[in-house]
Amino acid sequence: MENKDKENVSLETILIKYLRHWKLFLIVFALSFIPAILYLKIFPRTYKFEASILLQDEKESSISGIGMGEAASLMKSFGMGVGDGSLNLDDEMEILASKRIFRAMIHDLGINISYSEPFSLYKMYQEAPLRLTTDSATMANLQDEFRFTVSVSQNLIKVNVKSWLDKVSENFTFTSLPATIKIDRNTFTLDFDHDGAQKKDFKLKITVFPPGWMAEKLIKQVEIEDISKSSNVIYLACSDHSRQRGIDMLNTLIRVYNEDSEIYKHGEADKVMDYVDGRIAGVMTELDKVESNLQDFKKKNDMTLLEADVSLYGELFKDIKLALTEAEMQAYSIDLLDEYVKNPENHNKAIPSVFSVDEGEKGVITLYNKAVVSSEKLLLSSNERNDLYLQSRREADVLRESVHTMIGNARMSITKQLNELKSQEKQLMDKFKTIPDNEREYLGFIRDQEIFNGIYLLMLQKREETIFSLGRKLDRARVIEPPYILKKPLGPRKLFAGIGIIVFTLVIPIGFLFAKDLFISLKKEYRRNEN
């Protein structure tokens, strides 16, 4: 109880002590309005901009409705797709937030060059009276911040240029614009942005940042978040002093991302087209050989109506012929796949799709291609020493070994099936010993012709699918909510000014009185020790 009384007395003493200096608090309170008013007047109004986009799957175009006979169900047991169009939201967000995408946005808008009046915090956008531009070489090699102080007076333009890292400080004088300013290997062009600017006297500060520096700054300021893990909707937000610049930033960021995705899609499609065109040429050569041999066989044996006779024979061997045709086509396709996988040049590449196969997530090759695509996307936003990239490459190598195993197993299985079918064919052929040998040879030619015709049609189908996909314009990021400005500005806020007045009124006097008492105590202690 006694301790509580002492605490109350001590607290009352402190309050009374500070209340005795109420005039000091009142003076500081009055003075605190000065920085508060300066904050509300000088600090530029800051707006927040928001937008939302939906990332769309790049589904493979399906034109399987084209009649292809028995070849439509070929290779159902292999996952040979180069990508089923599915997307990983985290990967796409990393690409959207990468320095490469932001640098492209900055380059398009030119916002790495800021304009402001002396002693002003507001960064001009389209209303600046001057415009500073650089050539592509200067922009690509810019490694330092350049500050231009421009004074326009009576048709005399004075320019002071400073660079802190390169320790540059040069002065230029021009009587008219446009004018070229060369500093070492950097070239800048200064010109009036509109005709009315030539008739006024003014001063302007221009700062040129390397695009990479500006990209680092904007990546931290722009919010890129997913709405939920079960949705492909991405929320975008940023803040800026200029209403138009904030909207342009978000619009340009979305546009650059879509253009980058389109370039990547065309690059992948070109690889598929090169592979398919090469295989079509090879199949055409084999088909020409078979048809030429068939023609020579008919001439040699003077056969003109054999098709009518063979049609009767074909009814007896229809089932076995169809099975052999499909098995041979599968064996040939496995050889194509094995040839591509074993080629050292294709070690780190996705396995091209030459057939319209939809096996979902279970195909070994589908899983391998997804791992390769994922590692390529990671490499776009990082480097080859990145841990995530290295782990992704290791997973792809493990899956590639599984592809080799799958090919071996498939070859063993199809070989066994072919042997069984040929054995059954031989048994059937032995039962019809009256059939001439030339008819048997003729059927072999027909079967080979059907095999290459089927593969040729499949190649043509894949080629048409790729062309159709390239011709279809589909934005990767579909705009759900275009960029808009929130009604309530982020700053300056009257609430912040009021809080600042209260803090300023309390902290300054209390700090001053505490320091004063401490100084007096130390002074008394010092004199006591001297005596």
Image (cartoon, rainbow, N blue to C red):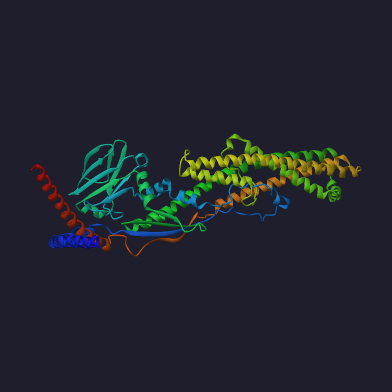
Residue nearer the viewer, 492 or 422: 492
Indicate the position of residue 391 as horizontal and vertical percent values. 52, 41
Q: Quadrant of residue 484?
A: bottom left
| Drawn side of residue 138 relative to residue 316, left or right | left
Indicate the position of residue 406 as horizontal and vertical percent values. 67, 42
Note whether 166 is above or below 128 in the view shown.
above
Q: Is residue 30 visible?
A: no
Indicate the position of residue 49 as horizontal and vertical percent values. 37, 59
Q: Residue at x 35, y 59 (%)?
A: 48
Instruction: Pick the quarter of the image with the C terminus.
Output: top left
Q: Is residue 377 visible?
A: yes
Indicate the position of residue 94 as horizontal and vertical percent values. 46, 49
Residue nearer the viewer, 320 or 50: 50
Q: Quadrant of residue 455?
A: top right
| Drawn side of residue 209 relative to residue 83, left or right | left
Most distant residue in the bottom direction: 487
> How many numbered discs, if any?
0
Instruction: Pick the quarter of the image with the N terminus.
Output: bottom left
Q: Residue at x 23, y 46 (%)?
A: 149
